[in-house]
Image (cartoon, rainbow, N blue to C red):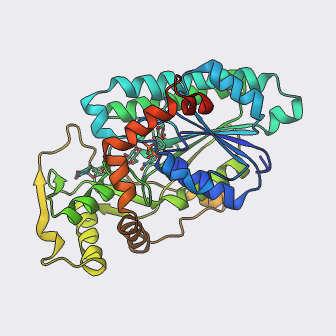
Amino acid sequence: MPLNSPVLVTGGAGFIGSNFVLQWLVEQQTPVTVLDKLTYAGNLENLASVQQDSRYRFVCGDIADGALVRRLLDEQHPGAIVHFAAESHVDRSILGPGEFIRTNIEGTFQLLEAVRGYWMELPTEQRKEFRFLHVSTDEVYGSLTPTAPAFTEETPYAPNSPYSASKAASDHLVRAYHHTYGLPVLTTNCSNNYGPRQFPEKLIPLVVQNALKGLPLPVYGDGQNVRDWLYVTDHCDGIRAVLERGVAGQTYNIGGRQEMSNLEVVRQICATLDELKPAGKPYASLITFVKDRPGHDRRYAMDIAKIERELGWQPRETFAGGLRKTIQWYLDNPEWVEHVTSGSYREWIDLQYTPSSPEGAANR
Ligand code: NAD
Ligand code: DAU
């Protein structure tokens, strides 16, 4: 698909979605509509810098609301959907899987249904060019032993947490809509992202925040679980490459080739903070081993040969460089953290999006 038509981005107020929208409005000329329910993880401050851009429109709503999605599609006439919206935190899925099933599975199903209806009514040429890009995760492939080869696009699915099972189910639905109805879908499976605007429940921003407050830095189990880290703008570049040059019906692994144990990651955060914001003692003295996550996957690693070979995409950022930029962003934006973690942000959302208030009515 040439990147010259409007796009509808679900979950665009979240971590990766907002980075994608900001990047899109710099790199591409075409309009972006963001559909986001503004759960605890969605934050309009992430998109404040483009609020005045005439190509940008924000709609507060649920991907499971098929009528709303269809109305937006008919109004905007997008040439592509980029589907980020999801419940994304593994620990929350262990405490309460219900919302993961509702948004990630039921929501994706309702979204696909609305998109299928819209797509079937497009003129033939536009139907061919149209793309539904589903943003998924490496976690659907399960867990690797320390020396096993990395996941390829052919690795059988073996999800282990309610989160990864719900993402796997959504991947299967997306695949089925291509196979059965011919909907031109693309799926990307990506490794752990890090960078600006990540909600401070995830490892890297949580450790940064705790360190700055002098609180314990919680490392689950023995700290030897391994993740592959990718800087968020590299992920967004990869998604645009897949959207533009990917073959409909195909899946593409995206990763950073930066495998590290959690303990190494936490130590590197501490060392970077020691340099950027020295405290009286080394931050590493705050590292605390805590009870392990139930069912904790031991290792993820991505084989990214396909996207490199076929689409010419490669990660550009090193872990050290990306981590430094990330930490600097959190140091420069303490009010962002304050807002997302305090009740005041929630209150503002309720005021802004309650149908009975004038502000709320304007945004619905
Ligand atoms: P996030 O939790 O930061 O953001 C999710 C966004 O989706 C939020 O803005 C939230 O308000 C919105 N949302 C949730 N439920 C919704 C609903 N029912 N309707 C509309 N909007 C809804 O997540 P993220 O880390 O930015 O991840 C985005 C996507 O990328 C997810 O699909 C996730 O599975 C996938 N992914 C994430 C990573 C990662 O490391 N963060 C890696 C690979 C894939
Ligand atoms: O692999 C891609 C996935 O990466 C995405 O699909 C998910 O949406 C995203 O949340 C992320 O999942 P993880 O579970 O890997 O991310 P998290 O930041 O929660 O944890 C990273 C690792 O650090 C994991 O092995 C658990 C560990 N951890 C996490 C936290 C929050 C700790 O040791 N201590 C912690 O306090």
**Residue 216: image x %, image y %?**
13, 58
| Res 306 visible | no
Q: Residue at x 49, y 70 (%)?
A: 317
**Residue 41: image x %, image y %?**
41, 42
Q: Is residue 18 above or below residue 172?
A: below
Picture quadrant of residue 75: top right
Nearer the observer, 119 or 99 = 99
| Res 301 visible | yes
Q: Residue at x 62, y 61 (%)?
A: 313
Tally of numbered tags:
0
**Residue 233: image x %, image y %?**
54, 60
Residue 81 horizontal side relative to residue 38, left or right: right
Q: Is residue 352 above or below residue 283?
A: above
**Residue 364: image x %, image y %?**
60, 28
Q: Residue at x 46, y 33 (%)?
A: 351
Q: Residue at x 66, y 22 (%)?
A: 114
Residue 216 horizontal side relative to residue 3, left or right: left
